[in-house]
Image (tube, rainbow, N blue to C red):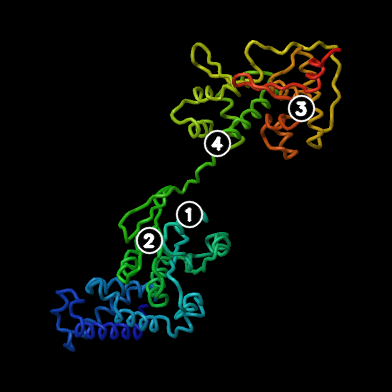
Amino acid sequence: MKDDAILINSISEYVYQTIIVTLDSHPQWLSEKYRKYPWQSIAFKGKFTAKLGAKLSETQNRDAMVTKLLTLLQSFLSPTFFVSDQFTELMGNIRKYTHPGLEIEAKHYPFWYSRIHQPDAAFAILLLDAENLPLDSNLEKILGEICTCPIKIKLAFGNWRRLGKKDVDFHSRGYELIHVPAGKNNADLKMSSLGSSIWINYPTAKEVLICSSDGDLHHLSTALQNHGLNVYRISRQGSELLVFNSQTGKTEIYSLVSKPIIPSLDDFIAQLKQIIQEEQTKTKTIWIKLAKLDQLFQEKYKLTLTQVLAHHFPEQKNADAFLNLKQDFVVHQLSDNSHVYITLFDILLPQETPPKKTPTSPKKQVINLNSKSDLETALVNIVRSLTAEYKKEYVPIGYVATEFQKEYAVAITKTMRRLELGSKFLKLLQSYHQLKITKSGTNYFVGIIDSYMRNNEIVD
C-alpha cells in the first residue's frame, strides 16, 4: 500500500468529507474531544488527511487497509454512526476505491454480490478462519442449532495450498473457499475486509458467526454489532470450543473431543460374553481376570469397561457393577483382594456341574448352518442330547450356548448375527416350536416339546 499514494489520498479526502457532513447533521456522533477540532480549517484538513494517509499506508494490502480504517473510525465516532446511512454510503464508496468496480470484485467473489437486492428471510452468515480453527460437520451442526436463523452463507478463509485436502471437505459442505496468500493474519484480514460490508450486501442478514482463535477480529465484531447484527465469536482453547453470544453476553463451551458411543446394556453383555468365550477357548481357562477382560474389551471396541459400566451403573466400582449382572456373570475375588475374576454364569451354575463325557461318546452329526431352520435343527439336537445326558426335562440355556460353541467352533451370537437373526439368544429359542422355555428365579431353562409329550402321554 506504500506505493499507492493516489488511492490513499482519495480515501483520506472522502473520509474527511464524510466527517464534515456528519459534524453538520449529527455532531453528537463524534466524541466530545473531536467535536472541538477546527474541521473547517484548510490547515487542519491537510494535517488530518496526511495523518490518516500515513496510518493507512502502513498496511500491507487493501483488505488490511479496510480493517485499519474501521479501527481508526471507531476511535472517535460513536456506535450510532456505524448503523447510519452515512456509514453505509462511506463503506460502499471506500470499497470502490479499494476494489475498483463491483463487477471486478464480483468476478472473484460472485457469491458476495449474487444475492444483493434479492428479497430474503432472515438468515445467518458463517465466517471461518480454516487455518486455526477446526470445524468439522458435527461442530458445525452445533453452531447451526445455536443460531436462531438458518446459516445460508458459509465462507472459509485460508491458504488452501497448505491445508491438504481440507478444501475438498469444506467444499462438499457448501462453503465458499476464499484463498489468501501465506502470511500471519492474512485470513483474518480478508475475513474482516469482506465482513465489513455484510450489512450493505445482505440487509436481511441477522446473525454472523466469526470463527477464529485470533483476537484480531474484535473490531469486525464490534462493527457488526453496532449495525444491529447478533454476533457469535467462536474460538478454541485446547480441546474446547468457546461460543460467545454478543446479544446475551454469555459463553457456551463445547468439547472438541468426540464422546464415545456407549452400547446398550444388552449389547454390552453380548460383547462381553463373546470376548469371554473366545478367551476361554483360547486359554482353556474358565476364569478371566477383570483386568485382562478390560484390556481385551478396549482392543476390540476402543472403550474401557469403566466407561461403559459407569454409564449404566453410576458411582459403582467395576467389580460391584458386575454384581448387577449376576444372571449373566459370576464374580470371584481372591482373599487378599489382589485380583478379581469373571466367568459366565452359564458355566458355573450353582450346584450343577456338567458331567465329564466318556471317550466312547458317539460323535454328533455336524449340520451346515445356512438358515434359521438349519440352526433350529442344530439347537434341537443339542438340547435333546443335553436333556438326555442330564436326565432332566430342562437344561440351562447357557449350557446350550456352550455346547454349540464346542461343536461348531463359533459363538451362537456370532452365528445369529451372520444369519441376521438378532442378538437375543433367549428370543431365538422362544421362536422355535420344538423347544419350550421355563424360568426359575432369574434363570432360563430349555427343553424339548416332543420329549415332554412322550414323558406325559396317557397310557391305556
Tell me: residue 254, above or below residue 173: above
State which tag comes first along the sequence, 1 or 2: 1
Task: Check residue 303 in the rendering and tell me which mark sits there, or answer none.
Answer: 4
| Mark 1 or 4, nearer chain start | 1
Can you give x and y, in whole percent of width and height, for residue 265 in the image? Answer: 56, 33
Image side of residue 76 versus residue 282, left or right: left
* Viewer-closest of 174 and 353: 353
Q: Determine which of the numbered discs, if any, sits on residue 232 in the image.
A: 2
Give the CA separation, mark 1 to mark 4. Answer: 22 Å
Q: Position of residue 40 (x, y in %)?
A: 17, 87
Q: Which mark is residue 409?
A: 3
Between discs 3 and 1, the one toward the N terminus: 1
Left or right: 97, with 14 as reference point: right
**Residue 47 appears in the figure:** no
Give the label on residue 202, or none: none
Q: Residue furthest front?
A: 460
**Closer-to-camera residue (214/334):** 334
C-alpha separation, residue under disc 3 versus residue under disc 4? 27 Å
User: What residue would you read off at disc 1?
Assistant: 139
- Please determine whether, in this image, residue 213 is positioned above or below residue 119: above
